[in-house]
Amino acid sequence: MRIKLNSIMVDDQDKALKFYTEVLGFRMKHAIPVGPYKWLTMVSPEGPDDLELSLEPNANPAGKTFQQAMFSQGIPIAAFEVADIAGEFARLICSMN
């Protein structure tokens, strides 16, 4: 058994898509319209193509409550790994300028 999909609640799917692709370097795998939202998944260029991160709209009241509770308690809902943390930090700082 292995993980296939993990979801992150986002306020704005388009803004999240831009951040995850242009800043973090993920690649969009699926963007399927579903009413006013999308089934939007990302994959890492450094990982398996079938392990997806879903950017879920927090329009569902339960999802929004969960997201706000985790943020207010400072509890991370996802963790990412890099081989060179100092290099990645420098890259992210440069991308903010």
Image (cartoon, rainbow, N blue to C red):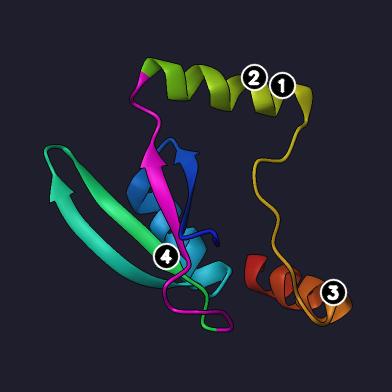
Query: Range of the magenta residues?
Result: 46-60
- On whether residue 89 falls in the magenta region, the answer is no
Residue 55 colored magenta?
A: yes
Q: Tag 3: Cα neighbours inside 10 Å, few (<14), some, or many (≥20)?
A: few
- Name the residue beneath numbered marker 2: 69
The residue lying at 88 percent from left, 76 percent from top is: 86
Q: CA distance from mark 3 to mark 4?
A: 21 Å
For label 2, the SS is helix
Residue at numbered disc 4: 42
Between the residue at mark 1 and the residue at mark 2, the CA separation in whole angstroms equals 5 Å
Of the image marks 1 and 4, the number of the one nearer the N terminus: 4
- Do labels 3 and 1 touch, CB within 8 Å? no
The x, y position of residue 9, in whole percent, is 47, 38
Query: In the rendered view, would you say 25 is above or below 53?
Result: below
- Is 16 above or below relative to 23? above
What amino acid does circle 3 point to? Ile
Separation of disc 2 and disc 3 at Cα?
A: 28 Å
Q: Position of residue 60 (x, y in %)?
A: 35, 22
Marks 2 and 3: CB-CB under 8 Å?
Answer: no
How many numbered marks have been drawn onto this rendered protein structure? 4
For marks 2 and 3, the one nearer the N-term is 2
Nearest the camera: 26 or 2? 2
Answer yes or no: do the residues labelled 1 and 2 have beta carbons within 8 Å? yes
Instruction: Determine which of the numbered discs, if any, sits on residue 85 in the image.
Output: 3
Q: Main secondary structure of the magenta part?
A: loop
Q: Amino acid at mark 1?
A: Ser
Which secondary structure, mark 3?
helix
Q: CA distance from mark 4 to mark 2?
A: 24 Å
Q: Which mark is residue 34?
A: none
